Image (cartoon, rainbow, N blue to C red):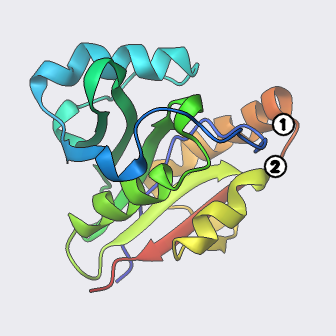
């Protein structure tokens, strides 16, 4: 039975990011979210104009850079109503750290924390398809979204078209070991 993971990722069209200065990707520490991260997570999410509802710091993986950089990326998964399914949601990487593999590392780490066989669903926009396909996600028909994601898909169809000028996409992968 597939597990679904839906991401409420504010996906903007990819633009080349200049080679960043500062900490290397190897120096960035990934750790589970904690209650002390709640305010930082909300600020991070609001800075990207993402809906801040449903943020539970304990569902997050946090990417932290050494020194004053602090939190440079976050990702959250949310269990769905169907057993063995989840939604990948709220993936945000600070702009100066984009294009370096940190988003992939965050998603991979988050998926590793889920049980094998879990179906993970997400919603995104067309310009982000390649990113998620590289991570093993496959595009679904909008009608194949889990029932508890249907309202979000309906709202996302309008928002994706109006805000990003793109089509909404539903994707899924099954966690393997």
Q: Categorize mark 1 by other alpha carbons within 10 Å: few (<14), some (14-19), many (20+).
A: few
How many marks overall? Answer: 2
143 displayed left or right of 157: left
Image location (x, y in percent) of residue 28: 31, 44
Marks 2,1: beta carbons within 8 A = yes
Against 38, is 57 above or below? below
Structural distance between the alpha carbons of marks 2 and 1: 6 Å
Task: Name the residue located 49 percent from the left edge and 37 percent from the top edge.
Answer: 93
Label 2 sits on a secondary structure element that is loop
Label 1 sits on a secondary structure element that is helix
Q: Please, which residue is most extreme toward the front here?
A: 21
Q: Which residue is mark 1?
A: 161
Task: Name the residue located 30 percent from the left edge and 56 percent from the top edge.
Answer: 81
Task: Name the residue located 50 percent from the left edge and 23 percent from the top edge.
Answer: 51
Sequence-first disc among 2 and 1: 1
Task: Name the residue located 76 percent from the left edge and 45 percent from the top edge.
Answer: 14
79 displayed left or right of 124: left
Q: Please, which residue is most extreme toward the left here?
A: 35
104 displayed left or right of 27: right
Residue 11 - label: none
Against 39, is 161 above or below? below
Quadrant where the N terminus sits is bottom left
Image location (x, y in percent) of residue 11: 66, 40
Image location (x, y in percent) of residue 22: 46, 32
Quadrant where the C terminus sits is bottom left
- The image quadrant of residue 151 is top right
Residue 167 - label: 2
The front one of 1 and 52 is 52
Q: Categorize mark 2 by other alpha carbons within 10 Å: few (<14), some (14-19), many (20+).
A: some
Image location (x, y in percent) of residue 91: 47, 42
């Amino acid at each position: 039975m597939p597990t679904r993971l839906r991401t409420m990722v504010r996906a903007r069209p990819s633009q080349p990011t200049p080679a960043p200065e500062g900490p290397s990707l190897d120096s960035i520490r990934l750790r589970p979210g904690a209650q002390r991260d709640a305010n930082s997570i909300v600020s991070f999410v609001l800075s990207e104009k993402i809906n801040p509802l449903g943020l539970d710091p304990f569902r997050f993986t946090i990417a932290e850079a050494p020194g004053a950089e602090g939190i440079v990326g976050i990702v959250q998964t949310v269990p769905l109503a169907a057993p063995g399914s989840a939604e990948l949601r709220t993936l945000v990487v600070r702009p100066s750290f984009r294009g370096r593999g940190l988003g992939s590392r965050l998603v991979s780490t988050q998926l590793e924390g889920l049980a094998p066989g879990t179906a993970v669903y997400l919603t995104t926009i067309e310009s982000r398809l390649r990113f998620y396909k590289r991570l093993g996600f496959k595009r679904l028909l909008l009608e194949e979204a889990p029932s508890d994601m249907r309202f979000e898909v309906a709202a996302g169809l309008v928002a994706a078209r109006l805000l990003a000028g793109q089509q909404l996409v539903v994707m899924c992968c099954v966690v393997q070991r």
